[in-house]
């Protein structure tokens, strides 16, 4: 993949960094960065004269809000970049988006009396037409690839787009049609009463909506998910032609039955995925937009720069901390990668990091944004809904695995800084204490979400209160005050941000309805267990093999479809296999969630790695492998959820003693794997082949979380450490030849 197709955006220097373009260029042999050396002063003119701490945030703020940076980030999202509208169309879209946002907020405190499905009908009527206005067709039929699209962002909607938007409005509102058209129409209650006995006009409207949903999904995410939907629809219709001796054969559904299941059923278009998107995810995207416009994202990155400004590994630590903190605003892997890369890549380059290694670090840190509480990826809200638990419970399940993920990245950062001789970079920035004193209020709204959830408030109300607090606190910084005009902009941006998720969730309704009507989910789960049982008879071995099969299937699935769709498909097709083997629903859900997320770091697609390579100018595939090395422990920890004796303790689902044991053993396992992958033992020196192999084996044994295997793993790790120590001593004690 070439970076020639990417828009150039200016390189950003954190406040006070004395970056020399010629010196940097000498350090970096790869000149293909999509962020060329350009402007030296990115601070907004209005920021001059502010207090020093405010000026520090201002430069990073200009970077993160630079249009080129935002467009570059959009190119590598699971979702395609949309149009940048101007003039009356932009005003109209903003008005509709704001109205939709107000409807969402109203629904939280004053739900529509007709019920939740009625609300979903109204919500979809408001947002689906916006997809055709905001996202260009780009109609072409390449081999399905998840590559960035270069979109003429200033090109307005075409006549076809307006026709599709109008059609979407009509077919979405049709169930609410108050008057009769023959035997059709007659209002929402009459429509529901026709479930299973749709009129011809109902079927036509449902079929048109199906086509529009698939097209909306194609426009926002590409061809793969629509093709998957088409395969499920074909299975629904032609499944009766399969040999009835096959376990996946069924009686077959006619066209009317398929449309009825999609259009007039709680498991179709208006099922759980759309309910979660319209009730939870949209509120968090609005919250993220408000937090971003209030300057929180810039503050988080600037704080990371200031906190680690002295040591050799400061540049790497800054990138990792920035990814974690910025994830509370973004919740998106590729976008966070570009944002933190735009700020920290100049620092990493001056510290001596090659482009590919820096890109791998940035990508791994960016993917962590989807795992960073309190705003996990969209699939986390679907977990809460599927399992009927509080979102706070899901946050609790994610806490320890997220800490282990970042532990692995930080250990790799420390190892690389020592092994490859990273240089300290002198950054003239404000102290972290000054930044916290001036802008630390940005953390308050995040804490409010956690506190309110802990007090039993619904997640929807908690995030609204946090949004109001963030908007009020924005007036403490005159450059980021959310005036009425900017507040409207934030509401509209929140709706615009959720459009691709809505398209994916509605399309996922095709898959969930198909598995519900045909029984495909249990049949596929049964096949997976049968394959495992054909290879082993021991229950533990069967569980382990099934988990490996599931991990491979989820990884392959995640290479093609967005994280949210990957989780939904994985849950309805694969999840039942693990549950049937006695694995708890929380462990199964989190297992599927993590492998869906890790698809953004998995070759050969690895969108976060591609985005990082575009920022650094590095080669794409070496960057992908570096990302895989940084994220390596994250691929093994989820397997521990479902296979190991006390794996549930990593989710907090055990006694305190078991949790402490599991955390300690897993942390040592992550350390061992970092040594094996990085070839260095912090404090001792370079690890040779034998110590690395021993450390790798130790890591696997430690992550089994059994007392016996943990004991052996600790022993192997100690042996590896002794070998590294003896090797280091031999190098020190070796006689040196005098050079004449």
Image (cartoon, rainbow, N blue to C red):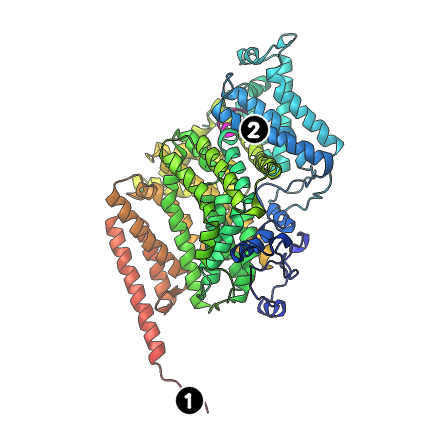
How far across and how far down the image is residue 254, in percent? Answer: 57, 18
Residue 702 - label? none
In depth, the one of 170 and 720 nearer the eye is 170
Q: Nearer the viewer, residue 446 or 226?
A: 446
Residue closest to the far top: 182
* Dot placed on the residue nearer the N-terminal end, 2 or 1: 2
Q: Determine which residue is flagged by label 1.
A: 738
Which residue sits at x=45%, y=37%?
380
Q: Quadrant of residue 92?
A: top right
Residue bounds of the magenta highlight: 268-275
Mark 2 closeness class: few <14, some 14–19, many ≥20 residues within 10 Å? few
Task: Check residue 29 for magenta coloring.
Answer: no
Is residue 232 among the parts visible in the rendering?
no
Asked which secondary structure carries label 1, the reply is loop
Which numbered marker is on residue 102?
2
Residue 294, position in %: x, y? 54, 44
Residue 588 location, quadrant: top left
**In the rendered image of this protein, does residue 425 appear above or below residue 365?**
below
Q: Tell me, yes or no, if residue 91 can be seen here.
A: yes
Give residue 410's position: percent from left, percent from top. Answer: 42, 57
Place of residue 377 in the rendered image (x, y in percent of width and height, measured from the top left):
48, 40
Residue depicted at x 68% and y 46%: 150
Q: CA distance from mark 2 to mark 1?
A: 79 Å
| Relative to 733, residue 80 above or below | above
- Above-or-below relation of 25 to 33: below
Residue in the picture at 36% in, 35% down: 454
């Amino acid at each position: 993949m070439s970076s020639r197709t990417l828009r150039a955006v200016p390189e950003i220097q954190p406040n006070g960094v004395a970056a020399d373009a010629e010196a940097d260029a000498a350090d970096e042999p790869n000149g293909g960065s999509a962020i060329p050396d350009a402007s030296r002063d990115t601070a907004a003119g209005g920021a001059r004269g502010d207090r020093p701490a405010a000026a520090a945030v201002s430069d990073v703020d200009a970077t993160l809000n630079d249009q080129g940076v935002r467009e570059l980030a959009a190119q590598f999202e699971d979702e395609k970049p949309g149009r940048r509208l101007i003039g009356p169309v932009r005003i109209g879209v903003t008005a509709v988006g704001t109205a939709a946002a107000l409807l969402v907020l109203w629904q939280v405190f004053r739900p529509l009396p007709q019920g939740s499905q009625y609300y979903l009908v109204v919500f979809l009527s408001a947002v689906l037409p916006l997809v055709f206005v905001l996202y260009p067709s780009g109609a072409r039929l390449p081999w399905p690839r998840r590559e960035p699209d270069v979109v003429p962002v200033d090109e307005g909607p075409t006549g076809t787009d307006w026709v599709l938007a109008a059609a979407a409005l009509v077919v979405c509102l049709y169930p609410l049609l108050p008057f009769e058209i023959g035997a059709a129409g007659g209002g929402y209650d009459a429509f529901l009463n026709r479930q299973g006995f749709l009129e011809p006009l109902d079927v036509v409207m449902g079929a048109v909506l199906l086509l529009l949903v698939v097209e909306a999904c194609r426009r926002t995410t590409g061809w793969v998910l629509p093709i998957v939907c088409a395969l499920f629809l074909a299975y629904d219709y032609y499944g009766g032609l399969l040999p009835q001796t096959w376990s996946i054969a069924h009686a077959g559904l006619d066209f009317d039955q398929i449309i009825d299941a999609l259009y007039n059923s709680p498991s179709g278009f208006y099922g759980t995925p759309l309910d979660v998107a319209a009730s939870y995810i949209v509120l968090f995207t609005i919250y993220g937009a408000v937090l971003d416009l209030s300057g929180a994202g810039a503050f988080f990155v600037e704080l990371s720069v200031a906190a680690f400004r002295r040591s050799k590994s400061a540049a790497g630590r800054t990138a990792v901390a920035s990814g974690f903190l910025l994830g509370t605003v973004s919740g998106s892997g590729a976008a966070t990668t570009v944002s933190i890369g735009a700020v920290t890549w100049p620092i990493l380059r001056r510290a001596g990091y090659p482009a590919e290694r820096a890109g791998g670090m940035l990508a791994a840190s960016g993917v962590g944004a989807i795992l960073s509480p309190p705003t996990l990826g969209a699939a986390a809200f679907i977990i809460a809904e599927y399992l009927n638990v509080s979102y706070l419970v899901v946050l609790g399940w994610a806490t320890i695995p997220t800490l282990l993920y970042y532990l692995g990245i930080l250990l790799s950062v420390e190892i690389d800084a020592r092994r490859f001789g990273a240089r300290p970079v002198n950054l003239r920035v404000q102290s972290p204490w000054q930044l916290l004193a001036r802008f630390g209020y940005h953390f308050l709204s995040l804490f409010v979400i956690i506190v309110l959830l802990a007090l039993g408030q619904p997640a929807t109300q908690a995030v609204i209160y946090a949004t109001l607090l963030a908007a009020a606190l924005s007036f403490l910084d005159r450059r980021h005050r959310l005036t009425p005009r900017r507040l409207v902009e934030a509401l509209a941006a929140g709706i615009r941000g959720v459009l691709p998720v809505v398209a994916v969730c509605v399309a996922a309704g095709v898959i969930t309805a198909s598995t519900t009507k045909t029984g495909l989910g249990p049949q596929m789960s049964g096949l997976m267990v049968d394959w495992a049982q054909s290879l082993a008879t021991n229950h533990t071995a069967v569980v382990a093999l099934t988990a490996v099969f599931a991990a491979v299937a989820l990884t392959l699935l995640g290479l093609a479809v967005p994280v949210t769709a990957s989780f939904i498909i994985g849950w309805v097709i694969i999840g039942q296999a693990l549950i049937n083997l006695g694995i708890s629903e929380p462990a199964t859900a989190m297992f599927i969630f993590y492998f869906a997320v890790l698809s953004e770091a998995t070759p050969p697609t690895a969108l976060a790695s591609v985005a990082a390579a575009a920022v650094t100018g590095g080669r794409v595939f070496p960057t992908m492998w570096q990302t895989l090395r940084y994220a390596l422990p994250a691929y093994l920890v989820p397997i521990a959820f479902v296979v190991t004796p006390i794996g549930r303790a990593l989710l907090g689902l055990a006694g305190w003693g078991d949790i402490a044991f599991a955390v300690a053993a897993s942390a040592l396992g992550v350390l061992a794997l970092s040594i094996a992958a990085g070839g260095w033992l912090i404090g001792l020196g370079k690890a040779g082949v034998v110590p690395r192999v021993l450390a790798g084996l130790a890591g696997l044994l430690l992550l089994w979380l059994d007392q016996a295997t943990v004991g052996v793993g600790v022993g192997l790790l100690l042996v590896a450490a002794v070998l590294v120590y003896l090797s280091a001593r031999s190098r020190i004690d070796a006689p040196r030849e005098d050079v004449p």
